[in-house]
Image (cartoon, helix red, strand yellow):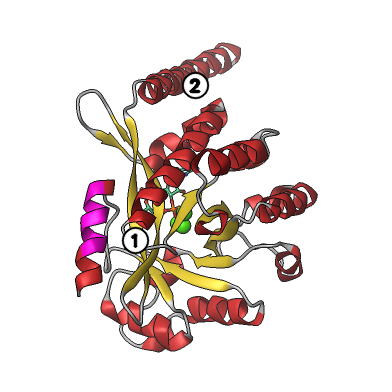
């Protein structure tokens, strides 16, 4: 029995070893990709549904490997997070967003906004505020056109820290939205204390809207919540007209999803925006 246990144990560690080595390999590859400028961003328009116009875009990170294949962010963001690389990568994403925003505002879209995803590890890093300040002052971009997307689960881990950091971010004039809203079970009384500007309805709740407009119970509830808290609201993952119409009927004015536009590179976004302004 003892022998059996021992061999079982060593089998287990060998397996773990493989997993850890794979993670370490990915981490080195990610660092090399970041330094080799093989990380880039794409932009997905956020739409004011009634007018069909873009109010802004979400910045989404992409990793192109040397053989030309793409690794999706869901695969490498977790590695960036636990390795700490996300702090530098995230800072670069924010600066890139600010620079690209200037380009877009130059074509006449003066109120266009950029939404930037922020990880827990960035948010709780002591240099986070300074890195925002630097990005703002180096680009002289309008702070109220930058929107940081934090997740609801972040709102739960350290409420005191969160409230303090949000106060400082708001003091810079930057906007904040809660991403994937409805999945993190934060308490409503807690939500009321957070200085955020916007709720982003998680794709899962938009997905539930099929056919008739009454199927989106939770999405509808989040819209109502946003109204009573005086917050903006946007639905993510809108894939068809029925969902858009249902959301509009709930009072949700903004949407993001494949139905309107896919994430696209900057040049394509500029063309897309220009074709929009002529229609
Ligand atoms: P997220 O913040 O929830 O971003 C929205 C995701 O939904 C994006 O996936 C987008 O391409 C996808 N999406 C948009 N419209 C639709 C639709 O109509 N249907 C469906 N099925 N999907 C849609 P993506 O680009 O693969 O990003 C995945 C996640 O990776 C993001 O989820 C975000 O959590 C993370 N991420 C991406 N870029 C960054 C970044 O710069 N920093 C950090 N910290 N996280 C990032
Ligand atoms: Ca997001
Ligand atoms: Ca989201
Ligand atoms: Ca999501």
Rendered location of residue 217, percent (x, y): 49, 81
| Residue range of the region highlighted in magenta in the rendering | 267-274
Q: Which mark is residue 16?
A: 2
Q: Is residue 18 above or below residue 212?
A: above
Rendered location of residue 56, percent (x, y): 40, 61
- Report if residue 209 lies within the magenta region: no
Q: Which mark is residue 202?
A: none
Which residue is nearer to you in this view: 264 or 245? 264
- Name the quadrant containing residue 143: bottom right
Task: Say which residue appears at 59% left-offset and 76% top-offset.
Answer: 226
Side of 110 where 175 appears, left or right: right
Quarter the C terminus occupies: bottom left
Q: Is residue 7 above or below residue 229?
A: above
Which residue is nearer to you in this view: 136 or 161? 136
Q: Can the viewer see residue 133 in this picture?
A: yes
Q: Which mark is nearer the camera, 1 or 2? A: 1
Task: Say which residue appears at 34% left-offset and 88% top-offset.
Answer: 212
Determine which residue is flagged by label 1: 45
- Name the quadrant containing residue 197: bottom right
Q: Alpha carbon of mark 1 to alpha carbon of mark 2: how far?
A: 41 Å
Does mark 2's beta carbon lie closer than 8 Å to ligand 1?
no
Neighbours of disc 1 within 10 Å: few (<14), some (14-19), many (20+): many
Q: Can the viewer see residue 210 in this picture?
A: no
Which residue is nearer to you in this view: 206 or 279? 279
Side of 18 where 7 appears, left or right: right
Rendered location of residue 133, percent (x, y): 62, 41
Quarter the N terminus occupies: top right
Q: Secondary structure at mark 2?
A: helix
């Amino acid at each position: 029995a003892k022998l059996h246990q021992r061999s079982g144990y060593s089998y287990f560690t060998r397996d773990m070893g493989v997993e850890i080595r794979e993670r370490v390999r990915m981490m080195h590859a990610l660092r090399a990709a970041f330094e080799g400028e093989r990380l880039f961003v794409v932009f997905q328009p956020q739409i004011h549904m009634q007018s069909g116009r873009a109010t802004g875009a979400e910045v989404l990170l992409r990793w192109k490997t040397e053989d030309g294949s793409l690794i999706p962010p869901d695969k490498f963001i977790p590695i960036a997070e636990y390795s700490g690389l996300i702090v530098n990568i995230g800072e670069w994403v924010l600066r890139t967003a600010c620079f690209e925003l200037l380009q877009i505002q130059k074509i006449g879209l003066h109120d266009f906004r950029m939404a930037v995803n922020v990880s827990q590890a960035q948010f709780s890093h002591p240099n986070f505020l300074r890195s925002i300040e630097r990005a703002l002052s180096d680009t002289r971009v309008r702070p109220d056109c930058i929107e940081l997307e934090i997740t609801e689960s972040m709102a739960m881990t350290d409420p005191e820290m969160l409230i303090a950091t949000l106060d400082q971010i708001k003091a810079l004039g930057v906007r904040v939205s809660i991403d994937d809203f409805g999945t993190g079970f934060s308490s409503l009384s807690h939500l009321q204390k957070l200085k955020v500007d916007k709720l982003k309805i998680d794709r899962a709740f938009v997905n539930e809207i099929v056919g008739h407009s009454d199927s989106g119970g939770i999405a509808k509830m989040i819209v109502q919540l946003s109204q009573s808290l005086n917050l903006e609201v946007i639905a993510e993952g809108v894939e068809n007209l029925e969902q858009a119409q249902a959301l509009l009927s709930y009072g949700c004015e903004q949407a993001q999803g494949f139905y309107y536009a896919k994430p696209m590179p900057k040049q394509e976004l500029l063309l897309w925006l220009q074709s929009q302004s002529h229609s």
